[in-house]
Image (cartoon, rainbow, N blue to C red):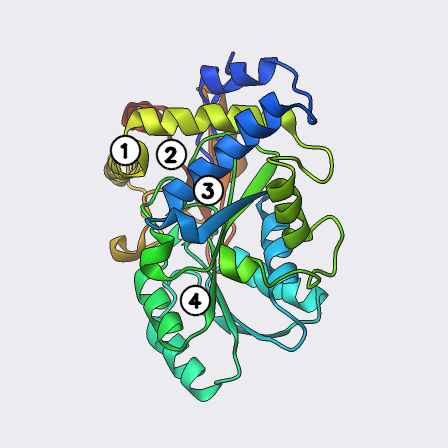
């Protein structure tokens, strides 16, 4: 039973069949779970992420996406290494905060929240600072919906011979990515984003040869990416600590539904149509998008408040009573709200509901 439709960047509305997958209990020591569910998911994630699956491996990690970002930075970047973070929103900046906590040698290259990361500036910085060993970037910046030019960024980073870490939290599963083709070394995402599972764990897809070199690097017990991976490899899907079994089983169902939809390419096409339907409907009502079309992702769309006296809370409540929940904006320079994706017909109904509110 749905009290409303979640039009948020994640957690998001899930199908009834994904919810139903959580109705059984699973033993974390049993092969039916470890091999039949966890190993199944790990294999399918790698197959989704890369054209050369033999070169990559997947690690599942309890917690939100930020737990997985922290696990990656804290387990991959050594004290003697130097990290460059390209940031054009809250989640890029959060990587810099994680680096501060771990006392990593790190430079945060800041871009405006409404502009894409510029590969040329990364190129110039890496040319000037040859001691940089790792570069991290957010693919789809959830703050605004900017889709950073990952192919161009990856080409620059690989030309300089650096390790590339990508936060693909709001893009993986909804935007085609080939890790091997781009040269991505570590990619991070979460169960409750484009694959449309429920919150509770995230995952890291890693170049196996580099992950194998990370033993002993982590400064955290719970967030030790190498140890988590080694336990899953040796135990055939066994987690080091208590696994979020119900959430993991739901995710396997969500993966099956992604495949039934036609895979990432088909889901991306649906998201693109969602975005077109949403934007055309909202613009017809007088709302303006925050971002120029050329840097806009199909996953998250931000809109300016329509007037200086716009009451977001009242607008939010009016839509909620009509069956829709949207998301407040998160940028510092403008008042905005964000809308994520479901199906095109849902956005037809949403724009009708917006019109009814009278805002």
Of pointers 3 and 1, the one earlier in the residue sequence: 1
The residues tagged by marks 2 and 4 sit, at their Cα atoms, a distance apart of: 25 Å
In the image, 77: left or right of 263? right
The residues tagged by marks 2 and 3 sit, at their Cα atoms, a distance apart of: 24 Å
Q: Which mark is residue 310?
A: 3
Task: State whether residue 150 appears in this view.
Answer: no
Of pointers 1 and 4, the one earlier in the residue sequence: 4
Foreground mark, 2 or 3? Answer: 2
Q: Which mark is residue 112?
A: 4
Q: Which mark is residue 341?
A: 2
Q: Are marks 1 and 2 in contact (CB under 8 Å)?
A: yes
Of pointers 2 and 3, the one earlier in the residue sequence: 3
Foreground mark, 1 or 4? Answer: 1
Q: Residue at x 45, y 51 (%)?
A: 56
Query: Foreground residue, 102 or 131?
Result: 131
| Residue 120, position as x, y percentages in the image | 33, 76
Of pointers 1 and 2, the one earlier in the residue sequence: 1
**Which residue is denoted by mark 1 in the rendering?**
270
Q: Are marks 2 and 3 in contact (CB under 8 Å)?
A: no
The residues tagged by marks 1 and 2 sit, at their Cα atoms, a distance apart of: 9 Å
| Residue 290, position as x, y percentages in the image | 36, 52
Q: Element at badge 2?
A: loop
Q: Element at badge 3?
A: loop
Q: Are marks 2 and 4 in contact (CB under 8 Å)?
A: no
Above or below for 2 versus 101: above
Foreground mark, 3 or 1? Answer: 1
């Amino acid at each position: 039973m749905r009290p409303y439709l979640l039009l948020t960047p994640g957690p998001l509305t899930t199908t009834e069949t994904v919810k139903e997958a959580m109705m059984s209990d699973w033993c974390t020591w049993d092969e039916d779970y470890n091999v039949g569910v966890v190993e199944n998911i790990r294999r399918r994630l790698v197959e989704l992420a890369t054209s050369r699956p033999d070169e990559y491996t997947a690690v599942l990690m309890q917690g939100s996406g930020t737990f997985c970002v922290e696990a990656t930075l804290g387990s991959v970047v050594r004290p003697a290494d130097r990290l460059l973070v390209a940031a054009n929103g809250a989640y890029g900046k959060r990587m810099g905060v994680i680096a501060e906590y771990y006392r990593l040698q790190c430079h945060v290259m800041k871009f405006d929240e409404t502009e894409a990361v510029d590969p040329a500036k990364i190129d110039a910085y890496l040319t000037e600072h040859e001691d940089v060993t790792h570069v991290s970037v957010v693919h789809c910046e959830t703050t605004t919906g900017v889709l950073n030019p990952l192919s161009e960024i990856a080409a620059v980073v690989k030309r300089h011979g650096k390790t590339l870490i990508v936060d693909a939290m709001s893009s993986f599963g909804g935007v085609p990515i080939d890790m091997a083709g781009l040269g991505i070394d570590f990619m991070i995402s979460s169960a409750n984003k484009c694959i449309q599972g429920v919150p509770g764990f995230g995952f890291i897809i890693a170049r196996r040869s580099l992950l194998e070199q990370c033993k002993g690097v982590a400064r955290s017990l719970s967030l030790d990416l190498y140890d988590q991976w080694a336990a899953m490899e040796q135990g055939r899907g066994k987690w080091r600590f208590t696994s979020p079994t119900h959430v993991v089983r739901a995710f396997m169902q969500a993966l099956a539904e992604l495949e039934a939809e036609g895979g990432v390419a088909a889901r991306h096409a649906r998201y693109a149509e969602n975005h077109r339907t949403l934007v055309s409907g909202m613009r017809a009502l007088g709302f303006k998008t925050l971002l120029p079309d050329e840097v806009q992702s199909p996953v998250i769309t931000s809109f300016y408040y329509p007037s200086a006296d716009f009451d977001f809370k009242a607008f939010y409540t009016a839509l909620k009573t009509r069956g829709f929940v949207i998301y407040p904006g998160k940028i510092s320079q403008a008042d905005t709200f964000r809308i994520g994706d479901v199906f095109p017909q849902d956005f037809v109904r949403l724009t009708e509901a917006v019109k009814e509110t009278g805002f």
